[in-house]
Amino acid sequence: MKNIIISTAIGLLLSVQAGCDSRNTEDARKPTAPDASSPSTEPADERPENDPALDQLAEDYVRLVLTLGNHDKSYVDAYYGPAAWKAEAEADQATPAELASRAESLLAKLPRTVEPAGDLQALRQHYLKTQLGAVAYHAHHIADASYRNFQREAKALYDTEPPVQRYAEFEPVLAELEQELPGSEPLHLRVQTFQQQYRIPEDKLDAVFNAAIDECKKRTKAHIQLPDSESFRLETVQDKPWSGYNWYQGSAHSLIQINTELPIYIDRAVDLGCHEGYPGHHTYNALLEQKLVRDHGWVEYSVYPLFSPQSLIAEGSANYGIDLAFPDEEKTRFERETLYPLAGLDPAGAEKYQRVLNLLAKLKFAENIVAREYIDREIDRDEAIARFQKYTGMSPEKAAQRVRFVDTYGAYVINYNWGKQLVQDYVEQGADSPQERWQKFSRLLSSPRLPSSLNW
């Protein structure tokens, strides 16, 4: 689930399948040899022995997640385990309350506390314990809608306590936006008018996105060894509460759906290529499948419950991955030199556009305030739309879509901004060079780490 906006012409990109681009097919089929810039993500001496009891609990966890998916169509984000398990789960008539009890029974089989340790066995136990706690919470919420509270939901589902902020903290940023985009109209309308200058014409989307995806993949492959057969395809959809979505399908393959209701601007090309693909969701899921499911036989990673701590790592790493692949001014330079000409846009405004985007990025945490107030019933839908516009610079259409998103996914909004901050802090602590940051990032994408085990 990604905050990317693509137009209908993105359907032309169906031919841009990772590893299948006619310009890069031969290179994509060659495995990247490990070197100083592409380290092994897991030292050989850390490989754990099989634990039959934990393996059985992991299987029970997978079956439980699949069964809870009967009651929430958004819950099971990906599954590529045995088909029989899915069929048996679909036939299970257990109520959400009963499934919450099953989750709590499985939790009782794990140690009451898991001591902080960097070895994979401890991380695996912590992963199963924390994920199961989220399963129990979500099952209780389905059984009783009054269970919902923003901060409690963030902690129970995403294993973190996001900062509680106030609108006043964002007034200085809004004042800077006022200076960048002076005028008499409401600020969010000035932002919308300004962005229209950077909208990619529909007949240019194919060339722009081909170039962006190629660059994202090239930069990622320079540091991360991807499975030989990895690929993804794109398709367009309508009438969704999100802008873009990566459905991982196993065997290192992803389906990326793009909601075509809203316009697309030049900065979104790189965002899509990184967040959804390289080094974002597609890369993350492909590495987890290879390193944990195939290499270790850890079946718990063959299912991905959306409302779980894993999502904070997934969304946070996908957003941080944009900055990692295009550090400092490299994104603006690549867009100005390559994407603007392909889109037929004037590159003279690239720097100002990036300044505005940087200010809008500083307002991302204000989304959490609006979502918290809305979920906790302090404001109604109309006021939530108004506050998204006022405090985050969203267009009326985008603000309405964002409220639909909160209606559907609740406190999930924290995973994009707070998740990015936590991942950034983890990766950059003690990593002074780009190579060191890529190494830590690669290890994170191949490990059982969750928010509360990032500092183990």
Image (cartoon, rainbow, N blue to C red):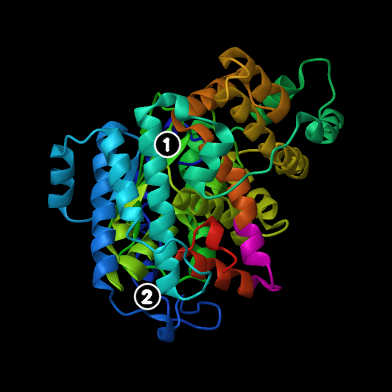
Query: In the rendering, which numbered label is found on residue 31?
Result: 2
Q: Secondary structure at mark 2?
A: loop
The x and y percentages for residue 410 are: 50, 32
Q: What residue is at 72 percent from the left and 56 percent from the top?
A: 329
Q: Is residue 72 magenta?
A: no
Res 126 quadrant in image = bottom left
The x and y percentages for residue 273 are: 50, 51
Q: Is residue 338 visible?
A: no
Give the residues drawn in magenta, as a range. Answer: 423-434
Q: Nearer the viewer, residue 283 or 431?
A: 431
Res 380 quadrant in image = top right
Mark 2 belongs to which amino acid?
Answer: Pro
Quadrant of the snapshot with the N terminus: top left
How many neighbours does mark 2 have within 10 angstroms: few (below 14), some (14-19), or many (20 or more)? few
Q: How many tags in the picture?
A: 2
The x and y percentages for residue 137 are: 42, 40
Q: Nearer the viewer, residue 438 or 13?
A: 438
Position above or below: 278 against 357: below
Q: Is residue 357 visible?
A: yes
Q: CA distance from mark 1 to mark 2?
A: 29 Å
Residue, far bottom: 45
The x and y percentages for residue 421 are: 65, 52
Q: Earlier in the sequence, mark 1 or mark 2?
A: 2
Return the residue at label 1: 258
Does residue 392 appear left or right of residue 445 in this picture? right
Mark 1 belongs to which amino acid?
Answer: Ile
Q: What residue is at 56 percent from the left and 73 percent from the top?
A: 439
Quadrant of the snapshot with the C terminus: bottom right
Position above or below: 451 against 120: above
Q: What residue is at 85 percent from the left and 30 percent from the top?
A: 175
